[in-house]
């Protein structure tokens, strides 16, 4: 399944040839870098080796019944199937990637992991039709691969190693396509449903909420239905088989439920971003010199009804910001004897933000230079105030939670 994690605002920043905001560094992925087709890095995460070992063990055991003459070599064949299957998953994700690049949405990376692959698309589609096609192309490629493997099966004996591998790849690709077409987020079918509701209502958020609730219903169905389906096969099952089905169902249900919930939160964040303005979030600040006692600085701030303290030099130029965390660490009775200078953070590059900054540009700025406080300045360099990261996070949290 694919996952879109980027945000989009009404004023798009300048983009490079891949639809990525100009000047924005690529994010590093976790895992082993396998290559950069179309400029998009592909990573294999450590969890992939766990699922590859599990597939090798399970499929190898099944091969012992189908091709008993293989002996221990059946595990090599089973591992080859695991690699080929995830190569098919990669094709599925590359389909999403190519369409995303065609629409200049930007793609951070592709990750192959325990439960398939994830294409991390930076921005949302701008129309329902683009959203639908972006989602549908992945299952479509999986269906096409299933057809290709079916045709290849006609040229070999099914009771041979190539026949068994081709049969397994045909079935697995059809299962991937069918699973991803289920109409609930975060699956591709959920994004297709979102696009349809969006087109009918004209509201992307309405589509997201509808597809998310269907996704949650699917999570419950998987949690209950997968173990029941295993028990209804009519074959003798061990306690281990039942336990494996229950654990697999629980993990899949949790992934679908959390993905659906995360999709709604991301959509609310996207809606809230255009209204996030630094000028509205900045606190009034008082200016003091570095040798000013903390107690005196706090007294001046209270009198001015200010929420921050800026340290200035002898010429009145701001050089540092008093850290809120450092203030809390100083006991009340010590504050008259502690100067603000050692408690302030120097104004490094990235800690001065334009008062008119907002939306995605503001998020990018605080992510590029993490800090507790930022100096907010006017275009002419005059101090407007101080923005606390906690205030920005609180505004976003309120928007995401719907409060």
Image (spheres, grey):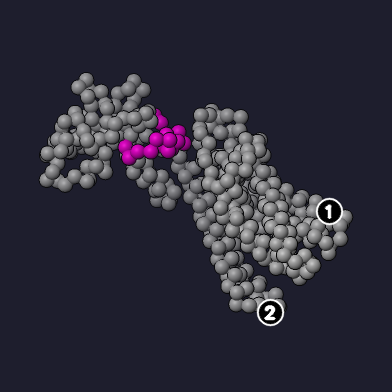
Residue at image location 31% in from the left, 30% down from the top:
347
Q: Is residue 366 magenta?
A: yes
Q: Which residues are magenta?
A: 355-373
Q: Secondary structure at mark 1?
A: helix
User: Is residue 398 visible in this depiction of the protein?
Assistant: yes
Residue at image location 37% in from the left, 41% down from the top:
392
Residue at image location 56% in from the left, 33% down from the top:
20
Residue 135 lies, in percent from the top left, at 65, 47
Q: Nearer the viewer, residue 301 or 25?
A: 25
User: Is residue 376 visible in this depiction of the protein?
Assistant: no
Q: Nearer the viewer, residue 160 or 184?
A: 160
The residue carrying mark 2 is 236
Q: Quadrant of residue 168?
A: bottom right
- Disc number placed over residue 152 in the picture, else none: 1
Q: Is residue 249 magenta?
A: no
Residue 86 lies, in percent from the top left, at 67, 52
- Taking the image as shown, residue 97 lies to the left or right of residue 397, namely right
Question: Along the polypeptide, which appears first: circle 1 or circle 2?
Answer: 1
Q: Nearer the viewer, residue 310 or 70?
A: 70
Number of residues whose C-alpha sits closer than 10 Å to that of mark 2, classed few (under 14), some (14–19) or many (20 or more): few
Determine contact: label 1, label 2, CB under 8 Å. no
- Taking the image as shown, residue 261 lies to the left or right of residue 179, namely left
Q: Spatial distance from mark 1 to mark 2, Cα to Cα?
A: 34 Å
């Amino acid at each position: 399944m694919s996952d879109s994690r980027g945000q989009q605002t009404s004023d798009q920043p300048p983009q490079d040839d891949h639809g990525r905001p100009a000047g924005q560094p690529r994010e590093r992925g976790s895992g082993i870098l396998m290559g950069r087709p179309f400029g998009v890095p592909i990573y294999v995460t450590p969890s992939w080796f766990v699922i590859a070992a599990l597939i090798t063990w399970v499929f190898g055991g099944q091969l012992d019944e189908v091709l008993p003459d293989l002996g221990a070599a059946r595990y090599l064949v089973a591992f080859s199937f695991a690699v080929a299957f995830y190569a098919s998953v990669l094709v599925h994700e590359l389909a999403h990637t190519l369409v995303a690049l065609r629409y200049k949405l930007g793609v951070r990376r592709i990750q192959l992991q325990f439960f398939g692959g994830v294409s991390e698309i930076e921005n949302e589609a701008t129309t329902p039709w683009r959203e639908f096609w972006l989602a549908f192309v992945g299952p479509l490629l999986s269906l096409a691969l299933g057809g290709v493997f079916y045709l290849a099966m006609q040229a070999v004996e099914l009771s041979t190693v190539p026949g068994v591998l081709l049969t397994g790849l045909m079935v697995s690709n059809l299962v991937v396509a069918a699973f991803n077409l289920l109409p609930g987020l975060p699956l591709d079918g959920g994004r297709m449903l979102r696009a349809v509701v969006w087109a009918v209502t004209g509201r992307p958020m309405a589509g997201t909420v509808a597809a998310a609730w269907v996704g949650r219903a699917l999570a419950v169905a998987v949690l209950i239905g997968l173990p029941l389906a295993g028990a209804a096969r009519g074959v003798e099952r061990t306690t281990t088989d039942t336990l494996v089905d229950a654990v697999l169902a629980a993990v899949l249900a949790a992934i679908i439920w959390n993905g659906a919930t995360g999709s709604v939160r991301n959509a609310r964040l996207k809606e809230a971003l255009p209204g996030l303005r630094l000028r509205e979030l900045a606190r009034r600040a008082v200016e003091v010199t570095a040798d000013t006692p903390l107690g005196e600085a706090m007294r001046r701030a209270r009198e001015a009804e200010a929420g921050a303290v800026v340290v200035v030099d002898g010429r009145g130029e701001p050089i540092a910001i008093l850290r809120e965390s450092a203030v809390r660490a100083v006991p009340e009775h010590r504050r008259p004897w502690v100067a603000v200078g050692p408690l302030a953070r120097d104004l490094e590059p990235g800690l001065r933000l334009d008062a008119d900054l907002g939306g995605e540009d503001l998020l990018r700025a605080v992510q590029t230079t993490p800090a507790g406080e930022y100096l907010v300045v006017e275009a002419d360099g005059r101090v407007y105030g101080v923005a606390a990261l906690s205030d920005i996070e609180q505004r976003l949290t309120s928007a995401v939670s719907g409060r």
